[in-house]
Structure formats: structure tokens, C-alpha cells
Image (spheres, rainbow, N blue to C red):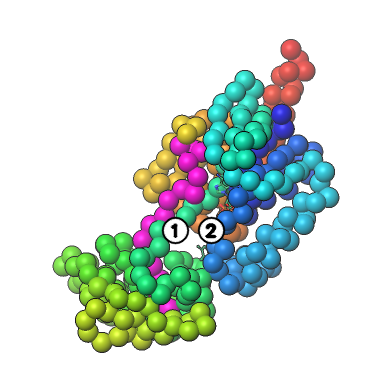
């Protein structure tokens, strides 16, 4: 039984592994290798690594873990996790199982992508969900906001910080009178026609084609269509969720299930790489503190 099984080898999981490894804790990181930002050409907003390719960032992180012989990275997919005496058993798709005294879930989330033809090749270069991550690269350019409900109105107003040339595309859905009035008051145009496809080349969006009406020439599209947990392990273990669908955590990423921590995008709502890494580190310190407490208790017994 290792000290901690970490499921998820993105920024949150690897950061936790580094801190726990340096605390001489035996750790296994199980990772399916599909981080949320794998579509992206460049990762932004991480001090000292602004603009690095996401895969390169993770490769650097994994390389930094190599000298810590207490940390093992294991490519694999965790399909179940259950509480056992003194810890947890994590079942892998391969049929193997790993046991740990504590469990850190750093499995991230998956974005619900707009169902539009032509979107896939533009994802991460000119189709985005987060202006903090990718807004600067499209500042002052003509931008589209995609969203079928009222959230898109709030999102469009937020995007004005990056560009004032905005069109909200509601893809066949009629915005409420209030939402329409609010965005129009702030100079955001609205196109309600169903979208047929996105046209672009070499990863650059050129125009949105509608079922009726003229095409819309834009440089990028930002969508707000929601997200879901990447793994159901937190749910299987009985973790509580907030109304955004992320795991409800208390201080240092602890959950309502003793011995289970959740860090990164899967918990809370500030979803950025630097935040995920920080949450992983925070959880690692809490996990080590808990293990130290248990070790001292066992020595006294
Ligand atoms: C297109 C795009 C661009 C982005 N750009 C930026 C940016 O520029 N700057 C920024 O700060 N943020 C950016 N983000 C957000 C960023 O990707 C996340 O905040 C960050 O990846 C969260 O890290 P994480 O470790 O929580 O999860 P992830 O990075 O998603 O890693 C989770 C890992 O867990 C693994 N996993 C999931 N389930 C299982 C399982 N059952 N068994 C084993 N492994 C599993 C996954 O395969 C993955 O490797 C972007 C997101 C997207 C979608």
C-alpha cells in the first residue's frame, strides 16, 4: 500500500506528486493521458511558462519527478475506487489494482463542445472557452460568443474587456428580452439563426456560416456550453458536488469523504493550470500532515 494514490497526471496531480515525493511519501500517479487543454497550441497565464505547449509543460513536469524514486507514474485508466481498511483500492481498466492510504483525485473536467461542423480543427487556436487563457491573442479582433442560454449574455459582456467587436450567436435559440436588451445596450450584436458550419484554414477561423443570412467574419469564437467531470470516481466515493458540478472541497482540497482529496479543475471553479498546480501542492501538504498524524498515532499505540 503506497502513501497516496493520485488519479490524474495533469498539473494538479503532478504538482501534488512533486510535493509528496519531496516529503518522502510513496506515491503512484495513474494517468490516462488526456488533459483538458490537449487541443491548445499554447498555454498562457502560468508565470515563467507563458506560451509553452501544454504537452511540453507536462513532459517537463514528469521529467522533474524522475529523481524522486518514491514517485511512480503509471499510464492507465482508473475505473473504480473503493474504501478498504486503512485506505482505498483503485481498480484500473487493465484489471490491476493499486492500494493507497490516501487518495487524491486530480482527474479534471471535460468541456461540452458546441455541436458545429468545422469546429474540431479550430479548437485551441481560434475556438476557445476561456478569455483569460486565450483572449489576449485576439484582442480588439471581431469575436463571436457562442451560447444558447442566458449565460452567454454574461459571457459576452465579460469578453468586452478583450474586444468591443462582438456578436452573440445563439444558434437557433431566442434570447430572452432582458438578455437581448442588456447585451445590445453594451454594443454586442446578436445573430439567432442556426449555424451551419465554421470556415477557416490552418487553424484560423475566417467566418461563421448560418442557415440563412450573410456569413459573419470573425477571428475567434468563445463558447460557454458547460462541462462535466472527466471521471466518476468522486461520485462513486460519495463526494459532495456544488451546483456547478465540481466537487465541493474545504480548506486544502479535503472532501466530505475522509482520506479523499480533490484538486484542480475537478474541484472549485477557478480553472487554470497555475491554480490546479497550486491546489495539488496544497492538497499534498494536507495529505502529508494527515499521514504524519496517523503515523504518530500508530507509534504511540
Ligand atoms: C482548449 C483549452 C485551453 C486552455 N488553455 C489554458 C491556458 O492557456 N492557461 C490555463 O491556465 N489554463 C488553460 N486551460 C485550462 C486548463 O487546461 C486546466 O485548468 C488544467 O488542465 C487543469 O488541470 P487538472 O490537473 O485539474 O486537469 P487536467 O489537466 O485535465 O488533467 C487531468 C488528467 O487526469 C486524467 N484522468 C481523468 N480521468 C482519469 C481516470 N479515470 N483514470 C486515470 N486518469 C484520468 C486525464 O487523462 C488527464 O491527464 C485550457 C483548457 C482548454 C480546454
**Foreground of the two, 165 or 40:** 40
**Foreground of the two, 7 or 64:** 7
The residue that appears at 73% across and 61% down in the rendered structure is: 60
Q: Is residue 55 above or below residue 217?
A: above
**How far across and down, in percent of the image, does residue 55 sit?**
65, 64
Label 2: which residue?
36
Q: Is mark 2 within 8 Å of ligand 1?
A: yes
Q: Quadrant of the N terminus?
A: top right
Q: Is residue 42 above or below residue 9?
A: below
Structural distance between the alpha carbons of marks 2 and 1: 8 Å
The local crowd at label 2, few if under 14, some if 14 to 19, many if 20 or more residues have their Cα within 10 Å, is some
**How far across and down, in percent of the image, does residue 135 sit?**
48, 74
Are the two marked residues, 2 and 1, in contact with CB atoms closer than 8 angstroms?
Answer: yes
Q: Which residues are magenta?
A: 218-235
The residue that appears at 44% across and 66% down in the rendered structure is: 129
User: Dot 2 lies on which element?
Assistant: helix
Amino acid at each position: 500500500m503506497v502513501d497516496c494514490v493520485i488519479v490524474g497526471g495533469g498539473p494538479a496531480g503532478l504538482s501534488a506528486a512533486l510535493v509528496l515525493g519531496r516529503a518522502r511519501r510513496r506515491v503512484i500517479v495513474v494517468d490516462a493521458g488526456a488533459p483538458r487543454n490537449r487541443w491548445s497550441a499554447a498555454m498562457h497565464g502560468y508565470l515563467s511558462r507563458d506560451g509553452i505547449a501544454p504537452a511540453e509543460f507536462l513532459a517537463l513536469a514528469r521529467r522533474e519527478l524522475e529523481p524522486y524514486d518514491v514517485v511512480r507514474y503509471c499510464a492507465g485508466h482508473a475505473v473504480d475506487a473503493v474504501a478498504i481498511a486503512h485506505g482505498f483500492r483503485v481498480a484500473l481498466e487493465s484489471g490491476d489494482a493499486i492500494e493507497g492510504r490516501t487518495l487524491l483525485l486530480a482527474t479534471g473536467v471535460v468541456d461540452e463542445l458546441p455541436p458545429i461542423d468545422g469546429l474540431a480543427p479550430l479548437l485551441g487556436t481560434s475556438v476557445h472557452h476561456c478569455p483569460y487563457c486565450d483572449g489576449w491573442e485576439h484582442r480588439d479582433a471581431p469575436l463571436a460568443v457562442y451560447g444558447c442560454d442566458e449565460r452567454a449574455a454574461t459571457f459576452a459582456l465579460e469578453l468586452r474587456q478583450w474586444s468591443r467587436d462582438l456578436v452573440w450567436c445563439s444558434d437557433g435559440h431566442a434570447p430572452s428580452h432582458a438578455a437581448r436588451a442588456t447585451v445590445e445596450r453594451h454594443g454586442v450584436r446578436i445573430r439567432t439563426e442556426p449555424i451551419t458550419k465554421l470556415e477557416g484554414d490552418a487553424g484560423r477561423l475566417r467566418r461563421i456560416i448560418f442557415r440563412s443570412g450573410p456569413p459573419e467574419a470573425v477571428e475567434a469564437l468563445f463558447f460557454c456550453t458547460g462541462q462535466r467531470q472527466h471521471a466518476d470516481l468522486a461520485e462513486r466515493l460519495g463526494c459532495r458536488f456544488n451546483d456547478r458540478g465540481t466537487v465541493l472541497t474545504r480548506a486544502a482540497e479535503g472532501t466530505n469523504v475522509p482520506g479523499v482529496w480533490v484538486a484542480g479543475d475537478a474541484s472549485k471553479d477557478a480553472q487554470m493550470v497555475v491554480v490546479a498546480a497550486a491546489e495539488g501542492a496544497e492538497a499534498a501538504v494536507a495529505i502529508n500532515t494527515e499521514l504524519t498524524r496517523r503515523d504518530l498515532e500508530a507509534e504511540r499505540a
